[in-house]
Image (cartoon, coloured by chain):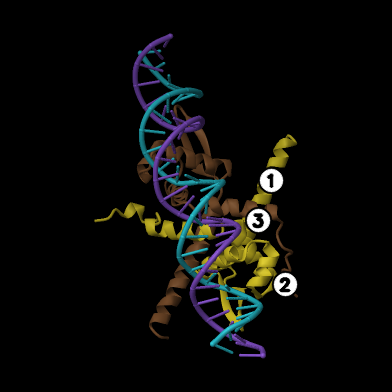
Chain colours: A brown, B yellow, C purple, D cyan
Amino acid sequence: MIAPASASLPSPQLLVELSGFFRLLSEPTRLQLLCQLKHGGAMDVASLIEATGFSQSHISRQLGQLQRAGLVSCERDGTRQIYAVADPLVDDLCNLVQMRLKQRLEQQLRQLQGV
Amino acid sequence: MIAPASASLPSPQLLVELSGFFRLLSEPTRLQLLCQLKHGGAMDVASLIEATGFSQSHISRQLGQLQRAGLVSCERDGTRQIYAVADPLVDDLCNLVQMRLKQRLEQQLRQLQGV
DNA sequence: AGGCATAATGCGTTAAGCGTCATACAGTAC
DNA sequence: GTACTGTATGACGCTTAACGCATTATGCCT
């Protein structure tokens, strides 16, 4: 028999940490950086600036947040900093949510069609 | 013609939708409501107010956001609104992130202990 | 050393969202 | 109908974080 996962309620601290993690993914800029790094492999900051169109300071700050959370790693190459995705979890989460969004839209479409 | 090289990159619209979903989970209050509903099953607003300690208006607003996103459903019972979790995805996401947080802390612990 | 590139950090402005108070709305009982 | 309960919403202050500009730090040259 499978336990009904009678998970006790999460502690306030865990709630804060979970929400803090999700908050990292709640900005399109940061998500875009993560997707760009996953797509293009390791990239330096200048490439990410060009790919996103944001200012240098903004990109640097967002990368800093992602790095402190362990989602990206960076190493020097001369004067450049090369960033790369350090955790595949984000990609899994995005895929799950994307499937969910798609299913929800399909359901709404069926309702409009009166099925 | 649109370059096919960026085919695997998510569109700006998708980025906004993904980040919007994660934003829902970026507030401890909403996360707490979802966990409470998962733990206690269907609950009315008054019970959720008592469980969280927030004001009635605040809880009502957060429930409204969760409902519009399809994460919770509600039905009337007299004057009361009974809310319930409508999508198991949030629970899966939280479990994934929680495992990740745990692994990261264990790793940091090992580093402090000198491997 | 100085000069040049790349990236990080103070600082200010601005927008978005939380959270509460007061009010309006929906439903029931009388 | 009025009175009462339970919930949603408008208005508002406040905190936080995005975003850019200017500056500073860091590392390669010659």
Q: CA distance from mark 2 to mark 1?
A: 27 Å
Chain to which the residue tagged by mark 2 belongs: A
Q: Are marks 1 and 3 in contact (CB under 8 Å)?
A: no
Q: Residues within 10 Å of mark 3 (few under 14, many from 20)?
A: many
Q: Are marks 2 and 3 on the same chain?
A: yes
Regarding residue A85, the answer to whether it shows in the image is yes
Task: Identify which amino acid the numbered label 1 is placed on.
Answer: Leu
- Residue A76, position as x, y percentages in the image: 49, 31
Q: Are marks 1 and 3 on the same chain?
A: no
| Residue B88 position (above or below residue B98) | below
Task: Identify which amino acid the numbered label 3 is placed on.
Answer: Leu
Q: Nearer the viewer, mark 2 or mark 3?
A: 3
* Numbered badge on residue A6: none
Task: Identify which amino acid the numbered label 2 is placed on.
Answer: Pro
Q: Which residue shows up at 51% across the image and 34% down it?
A: A75
Left or right placement of residue A89 versus residue A107 in this view: right
| Residue B17 position (above or below residue D3) | above
Query: Which part of the image, by quadrant, shows the N terminus of chain B?
Result: bottom left
- Residue D2, position as x, y percentages in the image: 58, 84
Q: Are marks 2 and 1 on the same chain?
A: no
Say which residue label 3 marks: A15
Q: Which residue shows up at 43% across the image and 74% down it?
A: A106
Q: CA distance from mark 2 to mark 3?
A: 21 Å
Say which residue label 1 marks: B105
